[in-house]
Image: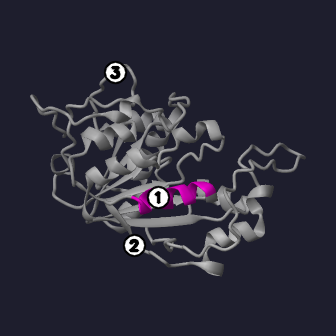
């Protein structure tokens, strides 16, 4: 169950005037996914909408985790949960935690429901919602113990950089929902986005890098990417049969050696998903970051 309190004045919503970080894909459900969506609706959060968009969130709506899960427990929220591989794996390992998947792609949420059923999980809920709106109003302040953002769309083209998810306004929203001491875990397979994530969060007064100064020099994945030149060879464009990969040319500034570091080790809760495996197969490096809410 969820609540939708009356008479509340929602906070300012600058996100509504910002370009969204996602591209809408087909939402049609077929086969087992359609069946899961119909039969496992008890795991789907009924988010009231503020517009005709099925990803919008009524600014007066508040997610009541205790009522939704039937218990009080730390809440982990994954933004852009995809097919639910990482979230359901972690939920199976940590039944004492509650997990909420935020995703705009309905087939992805339906696949997550199938995983919930297969694993017999009771501590996961899914919500089709624009994450910026969800973090601005839907989730109460300080209600999240961990926030995950793994492999968000890199938006390579310069004119599209404004659509990247992890930037100043989203950092403010993350700070709003995370409890003091809460963790924000991020991962990307593109060096220039990794640097942007690190820069934006390092300048925030709300967060501190949990691995400040770690993995510098030759141990830094950034140094290794610059040294190998892999991103100049293996780009983000689709590889056509019989053709060589096309570089995006979006490797960022090559400083030779990363003396700053701050990269986190991969944490146990983040399994190798099918999406990340494609990055490994292409030869790209993975960048993990963990920031703590002050």
Could you say whether the residue bearing mark 3 is in a helix, strand or loop? loop
- Is residue 199 one of those drawn in magenta? yes
- Report how far apart the C-alphas of labels 2 and 1 lie in the structure: 21 Å
- Circle 1 packing at 10 Å, graded few (<14), some (14-19), many (20+), is some
Quadrant containing the C terminus in the rendered view: bottom left
Q: CA distance from mark 2 to mark 3?
A: 39 Å
Q: How is the image coloured?
A: one colour
Position of the N terminus, as image quadrant, is top left
* Residue 131 picture quarter: top left
Of label 2 and label 3, which has the lower sequence position?
3
x 33%, y 60%: residue: 205
Which residue corresponds to mark 2?
210
Q: Position of residue 65 (x, y in %)?
A: 20, 49
- What main secondary structure does the magenta stretch of the protein show? helix
What numbered label is drawn on residue 86?
A: 1
In the image, 181 versus 196, the foreground residue is 196
The residue that disc 3 covers is 51
**Horizontal and vertical percent for residue 161?**
57, 42
Q: Earlier in the sequence, mark 1 or mark 3?
A: 3
Q: Say which label, 2 or 1, has the lower sequence index.
A: 1
Mark 2 vs 3: CB contact within 8 A: no
State whether residue 86 appears in this view.
yes
Relative vertical location of residue 124 with respect to residue 260 in this rendering, above or below: above
Task: State yes or no: residue 244 in magenta.
Answer: no
| Span shown in magenta | 192-203
70 displayed left or right of 294: left
Compute the Cα span from label 1 to label 3.
Answer: 30 Å
């Amino acid at each position: 169950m969820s609540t939708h309190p009356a008479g509340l004045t929602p906070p300012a919503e600058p996100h509504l005037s910002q370009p969204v970080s996602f591209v809408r894909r087909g939402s049609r459900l077929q086969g087992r996914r359609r069946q899961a969506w119909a039969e496992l609706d008890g795991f789907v959060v009924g988010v009231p909408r503020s517009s005709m968009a099925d990803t919008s969130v009524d600014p007066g709506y508040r997610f009541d985790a205790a009522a939704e899960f039937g218990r009080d427990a730390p809440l982990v929220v994954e933004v852009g949960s995809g097919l639910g591989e990482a979230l359901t794996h972690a939920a199976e390992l940590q039944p004492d935690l509650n997990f909420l998947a935020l995703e705009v792609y309905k087939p992805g949420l339906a696949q997550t429901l199938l995983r919930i059923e297969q694993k017999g999980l009771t501590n996961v809920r899914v919500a089709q919602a624009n994450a910026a709106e969800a973090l601005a109003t839907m989730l109460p302040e300080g209600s999240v113990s961990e926030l995950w953002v793994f492999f968000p769309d890199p938006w390579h083209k310069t004119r599209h950089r404004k659509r990247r998810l992890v930037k100043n306004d989203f950092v403010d929203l993350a700070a709003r929902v995370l409890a003091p001491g809460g963790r924000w875990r991020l991962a990307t397979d593109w060096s220039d986005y990794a640097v942007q994530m690190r820069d934006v969060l390092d300048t925030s007064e709300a967060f501190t890098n949990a691995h400040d100064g770690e993995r510098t020099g030759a141990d830094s994945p950034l140094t290794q990417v610059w040294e190998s030149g892999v991103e100049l060879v293996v780009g983000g464009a689709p590889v056509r049969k019989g053709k060589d990969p096309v570089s995006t040319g979006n490797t960022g500034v090559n400083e030779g050696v990363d003396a700053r570091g701050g990269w986190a080790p991969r944490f146990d809760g983040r399994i190798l998903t099918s999406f990340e495996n494609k990055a490994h197969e292409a030869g790209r490096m993975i960048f993990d970051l963990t920031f703590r809410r002050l």
